[in-house]
Amino acid sequence: MTDTATHQSTTFQRDIVFAVPLVAAGLGCLVLLTLSDARGKFSFPPDDSLFSGPNWVEVVAITIGGLLIAIPRVPRPAKLAAGAVAAISAALVFGTAVWAVKHWVPFGGMTGLARKRAEDMADLSLILAFVALVAGLSAAGWLARSGAITTGAAPNVRSASIAAGIGTIIALPLMIGFGTGDEELTDVTSLGTFALLYSLPYGLAFIVAAFLRRPAALGALATAAASIAYLTVVLLLESVYPIVTVGFGLLLLTNVWLIAMTWRDGARPASDASSAPI
């Protein structure tokens, strides 16, 4: 067996080791979301659920990411991007699931759901959080073993991504809480909820992008951008919290700016460090 064939075999084995649990976790999340309707109905998305359409998109992204990693003929840059998309998607699902564990019983009280059923749904959400965590760790592990991590990003890109990530983690919950004008949403519990659902996944995407090769960094940033864009559009259509809407709009612009900087000056892919941007 030639050195090239040996390398390809080793790479394929490594990809499979991480891709199998990633795909399994993605499919598991899909099943759990299907069961997440409080009334036991099978609809898409579930009518009476704390999980929404974007969560379905995120678990599909996890599953597809694992499949792309497992397919030998997929170009390495595409695999790097898919792995990053899966990792950030898993973080978003994890945050929502952990939040849902604490909110099923209050949700049941407001909608007339039997307490036992609400508690069962909370247990389901806990399982979903665990499965999403497995997905996130699998994707992160693959990125670490596949050469996606680098310190070769341009200093201005790295500094901007880290600063944007830290700023998002700290400022976004405060902006949401105080921007609603509701004092009940400015307590520590509410701010922690906003961090879990929004600022931590987005901030994580920004920060890790500073240490990923260009395809993976773009995948992480694009995942955050899609989620932020969705929330911005929803807020615009609802026209309820103008300050929060403006805040998410500014965050989206920051995200787009980071994508542009990463595309132009980010670290090159591991497969060809001297090639043009991918």
Image (cartoon, rainbow, N blue to C red):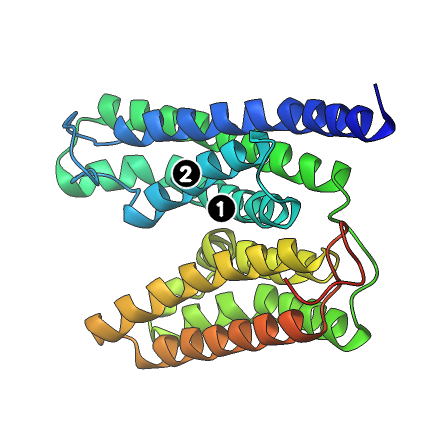
Q: Is residue 89 left or right of residue 46?
A: right
Q: Nearer the viewer, residue 192 or 230?
A: 230
Identify the amino acid type marked 1: Ser
Rendered image quadrant of residue 211: bottom right
**In the image, farthest residue toward the front:** 2
Upstream in the sequence, badge 1 or badge 2? 2
Is 176 situated above or below 89? below
Identify the amino acid type marked 2: Val
Residue with the mark numbered 1: 89
Residue with the mark numbered 2: 59
Are the residues tagged 1 and 2 within 8 Å (C-beta)? yes
Residue 136: mark in rendering: none
Quarter of the image for the C terminus: give it.
Answer: bottom right
Point 16% across, 34% down: residue: 43
Secondary structure of the residue carrying numbered label 1: helix
Q: Which of 77 and 193 is in front in this view?
A: 77
Point 55% across, 45% down: residue: 82
Q: Is residue 50 left or right of residue 42?
A: right
Q: Distance between the residues labelled 1 and 2?
A: 7 Å
Q: Is residue 181 left or right of residue 43?
A: right
Q: In this view, does 247 lie to the left or right of 17?
A: left
Point 74% across, 23% down: residue: 9
**In the image, farthest residue toward the top:** 1
Is 188 situated above or below 26? below
Point 47% across, 80% down: residue: 250
Looking at the picture, how far across and down is residue 188, in whole percent? 51, 58
Secondary structure of the residue carrying numbered label 2: helix
Q: Determine if residue 224 is in view.
A: yes
Q: Nearer the viewer, residue 108 or 277?
A: 277
Looking at the picture, how far across and down is residue 230, in whole percent? 34, 63
Crowd class of label 2 (few under 14; some 14 to 19; many from 20; radius 10 Å): many
Is 193 situated above or below 184? above
